[in-house]
Image (cartoon, rainbow, N blue to C red):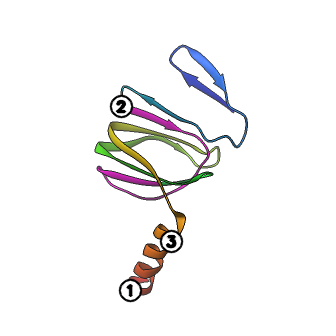
């Protein structure tokens, strides 16, 4: 997979999970499997390395290609954290039981 980053092309081995953050305002993520939930302050992104929880301000999707596993976000990034997958699955299971 090739990735364009400000006047240079970077080749990323297939399956590698990479996060690129420019000036805390533009984030590129590889090996994205799905977006579990999101709004302007939070994103929960399922990656090959687990659930990535992103917090910030005015967050929005600039580009998403799930087939290639690429996601680009715009906005101010304050926090990035990997969560345990069971926590999100359990929360979704409860919501699914209540509303599904």
Residue at the spot 58% in from the left edge and 15% down from the top edge:
8
Residue 58, image x and y in percent?
27, 42
Give the camera-side residue of 82 and 54. 82
Residue at 53% across, 64% down: 85
Number of residues whose C-alpha sits closer than 10 Å to that of mark 2, classed few (under 14), some (14–19) or many (20 or more):
some
Q: Residue furthest bottom?
A: 97
Number of the label disc, if any, that sits on residue 98: 1
Q: Residues within 10 Å of mark 3 (few under 14, many from 20)?
A: few
**Which residue is found at the position 30% from the left and 44% from the top?**
56
Question: Which comes before the other along the chain, label 3 or label 1?
Answer: 3
Element at badge 2? loop
Stretch in magenta: 25-44
- Give yes or no for contact between labels 3 and 1 (Cβ–Cβ under 8 Å): no
Q: Quadrant of the C terminus?
A: bottom left
Residue 24: image tag? 2
Q: Place residue 14 in its image quadrant.
A: top right
Q: Residue at x 36, y 31 (%)?
A: 24
Which of marks 2 and 1 precedes in the sequence? 2
- Seen in the picture, residue 67 relative to 92 is either above or below; the reply is above
Read off the residue under disc 3. 89
Q: CA distance from mark 1 to mark 2?
A: 37 Å
Q: Is residue 33 above or below residue 96?
A: above
Numbered-mark total: 3
Q: How far across and how far down the image is residue 86, in percent? A: 52, 70
């Amino acid at each position: 997979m090739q990735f364009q980053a400000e006047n240079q092309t970077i080749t990323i081995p297939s399956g590698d999970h990479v996060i690129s953050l420019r000036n805390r305002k533009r984030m590129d993520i590889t090996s994205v499997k799905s977006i579990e939930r999101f709004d302007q302050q939070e994103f929960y992104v399922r990656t090959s390395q687990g659930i990535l929880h992103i917090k910030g301000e005015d967050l929005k999707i600039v580009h998403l290609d799930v087939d290639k596993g690429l996601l680009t976000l715009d906005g101010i990034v304050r926090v990035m954290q990997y969560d345990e997958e069971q926590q999100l699955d359990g929360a979704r299971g409860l919501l699914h039981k209540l509303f599904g």
